[in-house]
Image (spheres, rainbow, N blue to C red):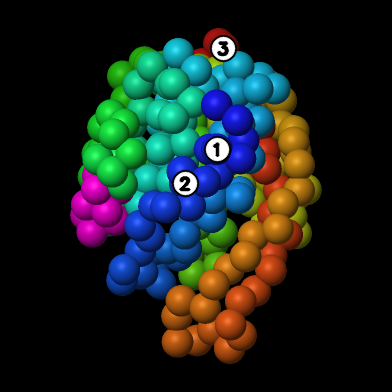
């Protein structure tokens, strides 16, 4: 599937109707989502025929992208039942098969490394300090092949140090820097839209854990 086609399909998905600020719910736009998954597959071969988990899947944009790129199995995890309902409707509209699981990512226990690749757009940790690190820690325990994640560019050094030192990463690489258009979703937002610099990371777990 071509990048433009993937972006077009993701652009039709429903997003949060009632976003929850405490969960830092912001939609992953089709521009970022398509590039994230397209790169994961075309540069590294981490999606097609792989078992892919989407942590904090929200309305299922990354899950849908993985499925459209022919992942063998896609599982979306989120704590919010409303988001999962929307995600299920999106999967139905696209006619793709995705399993959705309601759970707290920080308490997730999967036996063995049954997941090849984890993709995620975690909370940036602005409402709950360290939320981004909790997601990354959980993902590194689950993925056998790679973790793809978006983090604010301003946290780059902190992310790299934590991944290599604390989360058993064999490698931590910024693949590209993207612009994240944050729409005005909450009352405390003063501007109509904010443009944030984010890094797309690829983390490779050590195989001995």
Q: Position of residue 152 (x, y in %)?
A: 67, 56
Return the mark for residue 207.
Answer: 3
> Which residue is nearer to you in this view: 194 or 169?
194
Q: In which quarter of the image is residue 206?
A: top right
Q: In which quarter of the image is residue 63?
A: top left
Residue under the image location 36 percent in, 28 percent down: 74
Q: Where is residue 19 in the image (x, y as percent from the top left)?
A: 36, 69
Return the mark for residue 10.
Answer: 2
> Which residue is nearer to you in this view: 92 or 171?
92
Residue under the image location 64 percent in, 60 percent down: 180
Density class for disc 3 (Cα within 10 Å; few <14, some 14-19, many ≥20) is few
- Position of the N terminus, as image quadrant, is top right
Q: Give the range drawn in magenta.
A: 81-89
- The reply to whether residue 146 is in sight is no
Q: Where is residue 70 in the image (x, y as percent from the top left)?
A: 44, 21
Residue under the image location 45 percent in, 80 percent down: 186
Majority secondary structure of magenta residues: helix
Give the residue at mark 1. Answer: 5
Tell me which label, 3 or 1, sits earlier in the chain.
Answer: 1
Label 2 residue SS:
helix
Residue under the image location 47 percent in, 46 percent down: 10
Label 3 vs label 2, nearer the camera: 2
Return the mark for residue 195.
Answer: none
**Count of marks placed on residues:** 3
Label 2 vs label 1, nearer the camera: 1
Distance, label 3 to label 2, CA atoms, is 33 Å
Q: Where is residue 196 in the image (x, y as percent from the top left)?
A: 69, 65
Task: From the viewer's perspective, tell me whether residue 151 is left or right of residue 122.
Answer: right
């Amino acid at each position: 599937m071509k990048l433009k086609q993937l972006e077009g399909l993701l652009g039709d998905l429903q997003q949060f109707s009632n976003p929850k600020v405490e969960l830092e719910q912001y939609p992953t736009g089709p521009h970022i989502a398509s590039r994230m998954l397209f790169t994961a597959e075309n540069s590294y071969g981490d999606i097609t025929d792989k078992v892919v988990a989407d942590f904090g899947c929200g309305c299922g944009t990354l899950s849908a992208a993985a499925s459209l790129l022919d992942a063998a199995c896609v599982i979306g995890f989120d704590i919010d039942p409303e988001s999962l309902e929307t995600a299920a409707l999106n999967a139905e509209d696209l006619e793709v098969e995705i399993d959705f699981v309601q759970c707290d990512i920080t308490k997730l226990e999967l036996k063995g490394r049954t997941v090849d690749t984890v993709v995620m757009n975690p909370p940036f940790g602005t409402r709950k300090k360290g939320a981004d690190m909790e997601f990354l820690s959980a993902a590194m325990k689950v993925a056998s092949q790679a973790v793809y994640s978006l983090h604010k560019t301003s946290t780059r050094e902190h992310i790299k140090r934590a991944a290599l030192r604390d989360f058993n990463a064999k490698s931590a690489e910024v693949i590209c820097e993207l612009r994240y258009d944050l729409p005005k979703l909450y009352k405390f937002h003063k501007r109509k839209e904010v443009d944030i610099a984010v890094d797309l990371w690829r983390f490779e777990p050590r195989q001995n854990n």
